[in-house]
Structures are given as structure tokens and as C-alpha cells.
Image: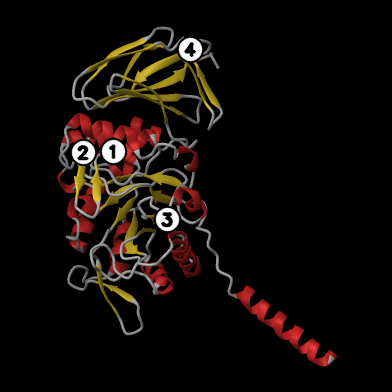
Amino acid sequence: MKKLSFMLLLLASTAYGQGNNYKQNYRKFDNLAMTPPMGWNSWNKFGCNVDEKLIREVADALVATGMKDAGYTYINIDDCWHGDRDSLGFIHPDPKRFPSGMKALADYIHSKGLKLGIYSDAGSQTCGGRPGSRGYEFQDAQTYAKWGIDYLKYDWCNTEGLKAEGAYKTITAAIRKAGRPMVLSICEWGNDKPWVWGPNVGHLWRTTGDVYNCFDCIKDHGSWKSWGVMQILDKQDGLRKYAGPGHWNDPDMLEVGNGMKEGEDRAHFTMWAMIAAPLIAGNDLRKMSEQTKAILMDKDVIAINQDSLGVQAFKYAVKDSVETWIKPLKSGDWAVCFLNRSKSDKPVEFNWATESVTDDLSGKALNAGQTPYVVRNLWTKKETGATNQPLKATVPGHDVLLVRLSPKPGSK
């Protein structure tokens, strides 16, 4: 009897030990995306019309235009790059669209000092009807690692019966097992509150459905909707506490340069910078106007987005269609944005001396009545005085006034 008990105990401990050997690591690679990722994605402009020639040309343009120098790093291929799986289940790129293969394309991107991103889906098919990763997660992650992929956008179409948290943990475990650090972009559309479980699993998570190139509209596709810039912005309410270095709320990609008016593009870019959103351009970089270049590469506005404190702006006040947004910065500076959501020009007045602002999330306080600040308009590049005088200005319709407050020398 003692011998039987001993054998049962030995078998139980062996099984338990084997279970530990196969324990999976559901935690993302750390020390990636410590500031919001910056780059380019093919979907907004090109949809399924992607091939290696386009991707190479966009990479060349990103370098030639100065966008790389401005901080844009990732070249991300979205849906429809896929070919078929082979007899062992390994995915291959479409041989007509990507005849040189993904490894050669990754090598080319890397030779430019850039990083390559790719797209897949947690379901059986991608949103564009290509092979999804369901059931092939570990094979796909191994394949991406061999190709030299740096960033994975992982979508949520055709996911019948799956639970989002579990599905995204599976692809995270697969990336871990493959051994190549990759930024994981959780594209679950915010349905299952990815901001709650996402920080340990991915580096950014979509908070909404798709954006489209309209400042203040909703586009009804029947079974789903696309959202204008202002609708997307409104859906960020209450989410700022979940974002920070290495884990970001993602209100979707930029539509700058895709058909909105200049002021609307400027407001769009400014608000994404203020809320510490990933700055993923979605236009044709080969054919940018000068005004689009000026917006996408404004170093002062990008600096607001890339601030290492990593705190999103908060909506401080609303008056007559003008919203006041405030963002604390690492250096003790503050970014303040006046967003005019109406189509008409609006006057704004802000008395710095009497507005005492406290941000409970960061623990920082803006008390310009005690600490004088220099006020600089980030889009015009002009100093507009100091906080000992009220700010008075007119904000054009569908546009912004963005200023940075810096303590006067000797006032800290």
C-alpha cells in the first residue's frame, strides 16, 4: 500500500512538473514603445492595394521627406499581403504582390534605419478575407521573427466564439516563444475594454472602431460604422489613466493629408499629440503637399506627443464649442490646447493668474499666479507673452490654438 501511494505521488509530481515546463509567458516584451509609436500604415490610403514596390517607395519617401528625422520609425503593412499557407501551415506572402519575399523587404526597410510592421488577425480570416492566425499563432510568430518583423497589428475580424483577452494573450505567448521583440498593436476596437487587461499583453490597444477622413461625421456601413476625428476623440473619455510609457490608448491612425481641410488636419494632429496617441500616418508619403509635410513633421507638436512623462491631456473646460485641453510635461512645462469644434471662428480668453489647475493623475499643478510662464504658440512659433497677462485670441473654425508654457528662467 505504501509503495502504491509513493508511485501515485511520484506520478502526480511528475505531471505537475511537466505542466510547469509548458507554462506560457503571456507578458509582452518590455522596454518597447516607451513613447507613442510613430510610423506609417498602408490601410487608410491604399486598403488592400499593397505590394512590395509601394512599401519600398513609401520607405524611401519617409526618409527623403525628413519624416524619419522627425521620429517616424515604422513602415507597417496592413491587410492583404497574405498568400496561402503551405502543407505544414506556415504562411507565405502573396507571390505576385511580394515576389522578393518578406525577409528581403524587411532587410531593405532595416537598411534605411526603419522598422517593418505587419498585420494579422485573431480570427480564421482577416477583415480582408485573407488567412487569419487562429490556430496558427505560434507558427505565424515564428515566421514573422524569421522575416525580421518589428511590429504586429493584430485585428479582430471573424473571431467567432473567441474571448479577446485570451486570444491576445495567445499571440503574445507566441511572440515570446519566437524570441524576437515586437511591438504588439491590439486592434480589438475597444469592445472588451482592452485598456483594462491590455497593458501587460500589448503595447497599444485600439479604443474604438475605424477612423475615417472627416472632421465631425459618422459613416454608417450597415453592420458597422466609421468615425470622424471628433467622434473618435469623444470616445477617449475616461481612458487616460490607463496609458503610459509602454502601453498606450490607440484612437486609430492619422488621416492627415487624406482630404480634410488644413485646419482640420492641424486640429487632428494636435489632438492626437495631446492625448499621447500613436502617430501612425496614413497618407501617400510620395505625394504630400507642403502643408501636409508641415503638419506631420512639426517638431514642437511631436515633442508634446513624445514627452517622456507619457501622460495624456485632459479636457479642462468647454465654452461655446471651444474645448480647453491641458497636458503636463516632464520638464515642468505644460501644453494647453484650445480646440474649436464649431465651423465659425471663436474668441477665447484664458486668465492664467486665476485658473489654478491640478492634475490628480500626474500629481502636477499649474499655478501660473505663483509661477510665471512664458507662452509660446507652437504652430506659429511665436512667443505670445507670459502668464501675467490673460491669453486673448481667436481660434478659426475646426482648428486649434496650441501653446506651450515654460517657467520663466529663475522662477522654478
In the rendered structure, find residue 372 and report the number of the disc placed on it: 4
- Say which residue appears at 28% left-offset and 23% top-offset: 321
Q: Going 39% across and 67% down the picture, which residue do you hit?
A: 161
Please give the residue where the numbered disc 2 appears in the rendered image.
217
Q: Are marks 2 and 3 in contact (CB under 8 Å)?
A: no
Query: What percent of the width, then of the height, locates residue 176?
Result: 50, 65
Q: Are marks 3 and 1 in contact (CB under 8 Å)?
A: no
The reply to whether dot 2 and dot 1 touch (C-beta < 8 Å) is yes
Residue depth check, mark 2 versus mark 4: number of the one nearer the observer? 2
Q: Secondary structure at mark 4?
A: loop
N-term-proximal mark, 4 vs 3: 3
Q: Which residue is mark 3?
A: 183
Q: Is residue 97 above or below residue 4?
A: above
Label ID, residue 231: 1
The local secondary structure at tag 2 comes to loop
Q: Is residue 17 left or right of residue 366?
A: right
Camera sees residue 272: yes
Residue 155 is situated, as x and y percent measured from the top left of the image, at 34, 59
Q: Can you tell which quarter of the image residue 52 is in?
A: bottom left
Residue 167, quarter of the rendered image: bottom left
Q: Amino acid at mark 2?
A: Cys
Name the amino acid type tagged 1: Gln
Its colouring scheme is secondary structure
Camera-side residue: 99 or 313?
Answer: 313
Q: CA distance from mark 3 to mark 1?
A: 27 Å
Q: How many marks?
A: 4
Residue type at numbered disc 4: Pro
- Residue type indicated by callout 3: Val
> In this rendering, is residue 372 above or below 264?
above
The disc, 2 or 3, on the residue closer to the chain's N-terminal end is: 3
